[in-house]
Every structure is written in structure tokens, then in C-alpha cells.
């Protein structure tokens, strides 16, 4: 794998978003930021491909 998949690929995307929002409910900004940071690292480990991760970082950093 060396390309970032930008096509919809999550089963039940609304359910996923609801779960993500629920994880942040009642948290401070700092706690939410920490959740997001841990989630990014967990998902990066799941992907595992440094080339894909570098491309995804560049895509996310575009303004």
C-alpha cells in the first residue's frame, strides 16, 4: 500500500462519528486534544506504512 485512500471506506460513518463525538463528551479541550493525539497514533500504527502516513500528514496539513 502506498497511496492514501480518500474514497469513503468506513462502514456506518454516522455511527463512527457519533462514537467519536461521545468519546469527547464532557472532556476539557486538553483532554480532547489528548484523545485525538492517542487516536492518531493508534491509527497510524494500524496503517503501518510510513509512505502512506507521510502522504496523509501532508494532505492534512494543506490549507
Image (tube, rainbow, N blue to C red):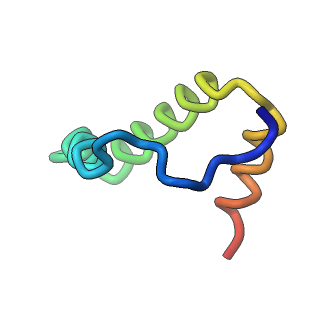
| 42 to 62, vertically: above or below | above
x, y percentage for residue 26?
A: 16, 46
Residue at horizontal 60%, vertical 55%?
A: 6
Residue 40: quarter of image: top right
Asked whether, in this view, residue 7 is left or right of residue 15, the answer is right
Observer-nearest of 46 and 25: 46
Residue at horizontal 65%, vertical 60%?
A: 60
Residue 23: quarter of image: top left
Question: Quarter holding the C terminus?
Answer: bottom right
x, y percentage for residue 53?
A: 73, 40
Residue furthest toward the left?
A: 26
Residue at horizontal 76%, vertical 40%?
A: 52
Question: Quarter holding the N terminus?
Answer: top right
Asked whether, in this view, residue 28 is left or right of residue 22, the answer is right
Observer-nearest of 23 and 54: 54
Residue at horizontal 26%, vertical 45%?
A: 24
Report the label total.
0
| 28 to 63, vertically: above or below | above
x, y percentage for residue 4?
A: 70, 47
| 44 to 63, vertically: above or below | above
Observer-nearest of 35 and 56: 56
| 27 to 62, vertically: above or below | above
x, y percentage for residue 48?
A: 70, 24
Amino acid at each position: 500500500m502506498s497511496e492514501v485512500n480518500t474514497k469513503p471506506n468506513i462502514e456506518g460513518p454516522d455511527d463512527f462519528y457519533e462514537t467519536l463525538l461521545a468519546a469527547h463528551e464532557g472532556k476539557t479541550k486538553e483532554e480532547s486534544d489528548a484523545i485525538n493525539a492517542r487516536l492518531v497514533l493508534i491509527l497510524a500504527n494500524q496503517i503501518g506504512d510510513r509512505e502512506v502516513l507521510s502522504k496523509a500528514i501532508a494532505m492534512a496539513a494543506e490549507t
